[in-house]
Amino acid sequence: MKTEKKNNKAKTAHTEVSPAVIKRLPRYFRYLREIIRMGKTRVSSAELSKMMNVTASQIRQDLNCFGGFGQQGYGYNVNYLYTNICEILGVGCGFRAALIGAGNLGKALVRSPMFEKRGVDVVAMFDVSSDLVGKKIENIKVFHIDDIERIFEEYGVDIAILTLPKEYAVEVAERLENTGVSGIWNFTGKELALKNADIAVENVHIGDSLMTLCYEIAKRKNENGDSSAK
């Protein structure tokens, strides 16, 4: 049974909010968790700014998109803000996920605690290997990929996680369009654009993050080289 979604006190019309703001919400989630672990009950935008390396003005603008949450002269009630950010992000909605491609990346993902921490339950895995099908990984059963439609319906899967070879990404995604799935988290390296606009797609390119890091390192080395030459 899927858990019922709570009534959000915050404004959650994401269509009215810029993608950049939405991308920053998981950072608020992470840092607020850390602040709660520190035992703090309130936090100012200036304090969040130092932790997140984002301007205090940007933080206030971001949170105002969803109702504000803060009080002038007081800052933010940490638990209240965290609860609302969780609701906006869908944490605790009981989303069910299935992972397609039980190779090294797939195994690494299901062994991560991130799903439990974010209220997502991985209920099934899929592969074609006879060495994996029928077995369990982290207590999650591996089904044959031919059973996607049946298992997605039976388990009420909301999120499909693709970690299979990129050459199969489009074929599998097209099959997923007929399963009633709500979103696809795509690690295949193949950019997916579905005909069904009701399915949200998050294309993850891990190599892009590495290249961004390489750029930053090269930039710093060039700057240091230029300054030492002066």
Image (tube, grey):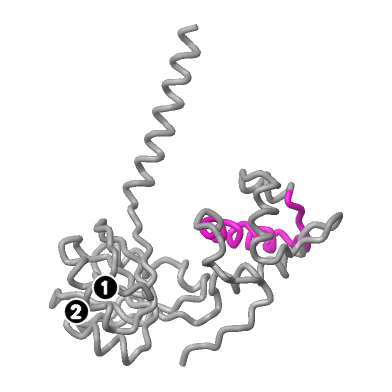
Kind of residue at badge 1: Ile
Which numbered tag is attached to residue 100?
Answer: 1
Magenta segment includes 43: yes
Within 10 angstroms of label 1, few (less than 14), some, or many (20 or more) residues?
many
Proximity of marks 1 and 2: CB atoms separated by less than 8 Å: yes
Residue at the (74%, 65%) spot, across then down:
69
Q: Main secondary structure of the magenta part?
A: helix
Q: Which residue is disc 2 drawn over?
A: 145
Residue 20: x and y in percent read 52, 53
Task: Judge by depth and name the residue closer to the eye, 150 or 15.
Answer: 15
Q: Secondary structure at mark 1?
A: strand
Residue 7: x and y in percent read 63, 82
Magenta segment includes 24: yes
Number of marks in the rendered image:
2
Residue 107: x and y in percent read 31, 67
Kind of residue at badge 2: Ile
Q: CA distance from mark 1 to mark 2?
A: 7 Å
Residue at the (77%, 61%) spot, across then down:
70
Residue 68 falls in which quadrant of the image?
bottom right
Q: Which residues are magenta?
A: 22-45
Residue 129: x and y in percent read 14, 74
Can you say whether 161 is above or below 144 in the image? above
Can you say whether 54 is above or below 61 in the image? above
Residue at the (56%, 61%) spot, across then down:
17
Q: Earlier in the sequence, mark 1 or mark 2?
A: 1
